[in-house]
Image (spheres, rainbow, N blue to C red):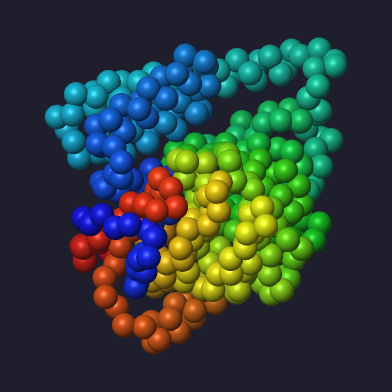
Amino acid sequence: MVRLPLKGYQICLCAIRFCPLFFCTLSIGAPPIESVEKIYQNGMQLFADEEYDGALFELNKAMGMLKHKYSHPLRSEVEKQIRITQGKIVVSRYARKDKTEKKEEGSGLLPLNKEAEDFRVQQVFGKVLARNLWENRDSLSTNIPLGKGRTVTVMPRAGIEVEETRSRAFSLRTVQAASFTLAGPNQIQLHSGSYAIGTQTAAVPLRVSSTLTDLTVSSDQPYALMTGVTTNGGMKVICLLGKIALSIDGQSETLLPGELIFALPDGFSRKMNIELSTLIVTSNLLTDFQDPPVYHAKLRQQAMLQAMRTKKKFRTVVGDVKGRENFELKILEKGNL
């Protein structure tokens, strides 16, 4: 494990494991036990507010940090609270369903048979929920339409891939605990989790928003990228295919395949290079679905070209970012690949 400043440092070849429940053991700026306690407190506050989906996400995140710490004083309490929260989710889900069936006219929710076909589910596994505007969908399946404005929540051990239907502007896939809103044909709001986004056409600019960052992605050719929401309200972005231009409030950066950058509320970090061949086999965004993304063959070709151009030095996982100057980094052993 190493600790590196972000500014002025270039990673030669590294692999990014995009998994919401994966956390590097290196923590910048706070001891690990404090980080676990803070995350647990966040989860308990959400539980008290009856925001059970969010509470489960925070508690699972804490459990991920305690995975191999069997003697940690919080471990048994976190495990217990996860079970309680999962039960609350089931109870509240059926309560919402019962209320929906008995709701009076004027409730504000539109009937499912009137839902717009702005997006369509391409693949799905596990428990994935859809909320807002139309009646609640508590179990999504392939080919179900999703209208603009839908908020989708992906539970642990679940995943979904959706595509914009009218102009095929983009497709999006995410796994594990994640939440996002399909704000428009060219706009996505990411609340939590990690995502693979691609387009088969030279689409109009795509606006991708996180808690505190509004990012515009544009390109004059088909492209694919990965992005994940960071704890400070920004995003981690990796270019997989094509040449993409990123902009935040007048600041701009260009990414080529294999380049990573953090898009933060106050601007961009320095760019880093990552090893695409390792990313292909370690990222559950690419491996957990029954069918690979449509750009998978081109991504493998790009990884081969990159391997011929560069000489491997070491493989790492880049985790979260605390600011423009520091990030989390873990070197992968051969047994982890």
Residue toward you, 312 or 143: 312
Q: Residue at x 45, y 18 (%)?
A: 45
Q: Quadrant of the N terminus?
A: bottom left
Residue toward you, 80 or 10: 10
What x and y, as percent, mark residue 165? 77, 55
Residue toward you, 53 or 235: 235
**Horizontal placement of 293 versus 163: left or right?**
left
What x and y, as percent, mark residue 276? 42, 71
**Horizontal placement of 108 versus 218: left or right?**
right
Q: Residue furthest bottom?
A: 308
**Horizontal placement of 37 versus 104: left or right?**
left
Res. 122 image quadrant? bottom right
Res. 101 image quadrant? top right
Q: Residue at x 62, y 69 (%)?
A: 244
What x and y, as percent, mark residue 274? 40, 69
What x and y, as percent, mark residue 108? 81, 22
Q: Residue at x 43, y 81 (%)?
A: 306
Instruction: Let me know if residue 69 appears in the view.
Output: yes
Check the image and report above or below for 92 versus 207: above
Q: Residue at x 29, y 78 (%)?
A: 312
Check the image and report above or below for 150 versus 314: above
Q: Quadrant of the C terminus?
A: bottom left
Instruction: Let me know if residue 123 appears in the view.
Output: no
